[in-house]
Image: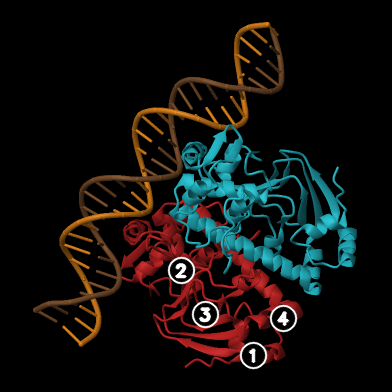
Chain colours: A red, B cyan, C brown, D orange
Amino acid sequence: MVDLYSLERLMSFPIFVNLASSDIQELLLRSRKKTLENGESYFSFGDKVLNFSVLCEGAIQLYRETRDGHELTKEILIVGDTIGDEEILLSSPTHQFNALAIKDAILLEFPIAWLKENLKKNSSLALNLLAKLAHKSHIATMEAEHKGTMMAAQQVSCFLERLCVLHDFDPRGFELPYSKTMIASRLGMELETFSRALSKVREHGIRVEGNRISFENILAAEEYACADCTIVDNCAEHNELKERLNITKPKDVGPQSKCRGDVS
Amino acid sequence: MVDLYSLERLMSFPIFVNLASSDIQELLLRSRKKTLENGESYFSFGDKVLNFSVLCEGAIQLYRETRDGHELTKEILIVGDTIGDEEILLSSPTHQFNALAIKDAILLEFPIAWLKENLKKNSSLALNLLAKLAHKSHIATMEAEHKGTMMAAQQVSCFLERLCVLHDFDPRGFELPYSKTMIASRLGMELETFSRALSKVREHGIRVEGNRISFENILAAEEYACADCTIVDNCAEHNELKERLNITKPKDVGPQSKCRGDVS
DNA sequence: CGACACTTTGAAGACGATCAACGCCGGTGG
DNA sequence: CCACCGGCGTTGATCGTCTTCAAAGTGTCG
């Protein structure tokens, strides 16, 4: 069992980074712990926004349903991510999507009033949230661009590379952390399309066997994934991946590419 | 000629709303005025990020170019919008897109150090920026969903309705504020597709004659645009539009829909 | 062994992108 | 004044990719 209340752990989350320990201690006094089992709903579309929450363990899917019963995954949250910030900042009284635990999860909850207060008082917290939102917005832009310019298989290739880095998996072989159905939904494509895309990435240096992924030829995979990406230096995760596989230290990072990606 | 330095004008911009007049006075001392002519470039991909800027007049297109020479419009900024906030918050030393004046434009520029400073000191400024980014992120989510679930003509219909409200045009007849080429690019579709979509929306209560748009049957247009939108109460702009046309006061706004949209 | 969830594969269909041709208009120059 | 040109928008035909529908395969767990 993870020590939920470890200061170091909390301070490693982007939202709390740079906060004084005293602030975090103060934090914890106002917080509630919430546990969810795999498959348990956290809230649904239309529910009142009660809390600002930080995900400490597990994973949570944010999704909506279209009228024809289709499910649209907006995001998959992983440890360190936050829930409710957007609604609070938009002054939306109700949630605009459903939240479902897709692994056993633990959250720290804070009443929304707490966040509103502390954003005014604590500039570090406000800056952290600003950085997070800016990042999110950047990712959204990038993925929108990808959806418009790349073929499904290229998106999958790009996704797998980012996934590997962000989850700190071994690039030489790792298991997908979610079902393929979930990933397809996250990528905004049909399961069938995703399945066929997985076949295709095999021709580009990525081995796929069941749920096991391994990067056999990262340069080929990289080349394929980024062929139509406008980010010149390619994604930070992609470079990270190459470094880990000891292929090429990018000669000079220089004007850094900003293709970081919440891949979840 | 607009009085650029009118306090009321600046305070009406989302980014400066709620700031004390003294703060705004202070602001102006640090600012530089920059004018651009229609067609003039403000900065290009890869340029160093030097300023945080507020657009006071005109319009600016943010776009990238793909390798095959295609142009991708990320956003069209209108009066009151800001430039450079994202880069500063992401600590990106260079711009990740091009900025081009598509009307004669006037900006107020602040050195990036200024923004960094003031975000710490001035919580209202930080909160305004947070609200703006949250809103931007929300729009991005919505438009991504639209691109995935609606046909081109539905997106166009939705866009025209939001455009009308955000630019405060007369719903019974107004001119498109940008070229069709520009709008198509903004919507992430080809000019031909946009052109055909305009033909199709005619069958759904929207008259299109050259660059003139008029909403003849807002209920039909609304029904068409939102048929596949998961936002239950539909866009705030759509409701606003219906009110302006005196069709139906929405019986009860209730849990407010959050489909506001920077349509530019 | 059978039930069930999940995934793969195949074939048909829909939508938007692409290529190509044309119409329209304003400007420029002879 | 007219001829020519370029930018912009429309329309038609074709093509590619993703979606959809259908069926079969794989795995797990009782």
Callout 2–callout 1 Cβ contact below 8 Å: no
Expressed as whole percent of the image width and height from the top left, the position of residue A92 reads 61, 70
Q: Secondary structure at mark 4?
A: helix
Does B70 appear above or below A2? above
User: Between marks 3 and 1, how big is the CA–CA gap?
Assistant: 20 Å
Badge 2, how many Cα within 10 Å: few under 14, some, many 20+?
many
Question: Residue A130 appears in which quarter of the rendering?
Answer: bottom right
- Residue nearest the observer in this picture, B37 or A68: A68
Give the label on residue A63, or none.
2
* For marks 3 and 1 on the same chain, the one whose residue lies earlier in the sequence: 1
Parent chain of label 3? A
User: Between marks 2 and 3, how big is the CA–CA gap?
Assistant: 18 Å
The residue carrying mark 1 is: A30
Badge 1, how many Cα within 10 Å: few under 14, some, many 20+?
few
- From the viewer's perspective, is A27 left or right of A154? right
Q: Secondary structure at mark 1?
A: helix
Badge 4, how many Cα within 10 Å: few under 14, some, many 20+?
few
Does A161 appear above or below B147? below
Q: Mark 4: which amino acid? A: Glu
Give the label on residue A117, or none.
4
Give the label on residue A79, or none.
3
